[in-house]
C-alpha cells in the first residue's frame, strides 16, 4: 500500500469499503488507448485482485462485514447521469 502520509489518510481511506471490478474508464476506452491485449490483462487483474481480497478475508478471519452484491448508483432525475 502506498500512501503519502499514513495508511487510511488519503485514497486508501476514502473508498467506502467497496470492492469494485472496474476502472474509472470503460474497458473500450482502455482498449483504444492501450490495445486489446493490455485491456484484457487489466480486466483480469481487477478480478484477480478482488479474489485475493476475499481469500485474505477468509484466511485471516478479518471481521469486515463483507457483503456480496451489486452497486446500484442512483440516477438523478432529468439529468440522465448516474
Image: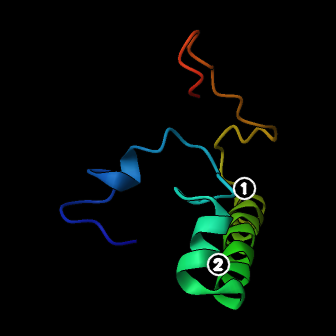
Secondary structure beneath dot 2 equals: helix
Q: How far apart, in angstroms, are the residues tagged by discs 1 and 2?
A: 28 Å
State the residue position of label 1: 61
Residue 51 quadrant? bottom right
Q: Position of residue 13 (x, y in %)?
A: 38, 47
- Horizontal side of residue 81 vs 62, given as left or right: left
Could you tell whether 42 is left or right of 24 in the image?
right
* Residue at the spot of label 2: 42
- Residue for point 53% across, 79% down: 33
Q: Callout 2: few (<14), some (14-19), or many (20+) C-alpha neighbours within 10 Å?
A: some
Of tags 1 and 2, which is closer to the observer?
2
The quadrant the C terminus occupies is: top right
Q: Which mark, by number, is residue 72? A: none
Which of the two residues, 34 or 58, is positioned nearer the viewer here?
A: 34
Task: Tell whether 25 sits left or right of 57.
Answer: left
- Counting from the top left corner in percent of width and height, residue 36 is at 71, 85
Residue at x 58% of width, y 72% of height: 30
Quarter assignment of residue 26:
bottom right
Total number of numbered labels? Answer: 2
Dividing the picture into quadrants, the one containing residue 41 is bottom right
Nearer the observer, 53 or 42: 42
Horizontal and vertical percent for residue 20? 65, 52
- The x and y percentages for residue 18 are 60, 44
Q: Secondary structure under badge 1? A: loop
Q: Quadrant of the N terminus?
A: bottom left
Note whether 54 is above or below 8 in the view shown. Answer: below
Which of marks 2 and 1 precedes in the sequence? 2
- Residue occupying image coordinates x 72% and y 42%: 66
Amino acid at each position: 500500500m502506498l500512501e503519502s502520509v499514513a495508511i487510511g489518510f488519503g485514497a486508501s481511506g476514502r473508498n467506502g469499503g467497496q470492492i469494485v471490478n472496474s476502472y474509472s474508464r470503460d474497458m473500450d476506452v482502455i482498449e483504444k488507448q492501450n490495445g486489446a491485449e493490455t485491456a484484457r490483462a487489466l480486466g483480469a487483474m481487477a478480478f484477480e485482485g478482488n479474489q485475493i481480497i476475499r481469500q485474505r478475508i477468509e484466511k485471516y478471519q478479518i471481521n469486515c462485514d463483507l457483503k456480496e452484491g451489486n452497486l446500484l448508483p442512483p440516477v438523478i432525475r432529468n439529468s440522465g447521469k448516474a
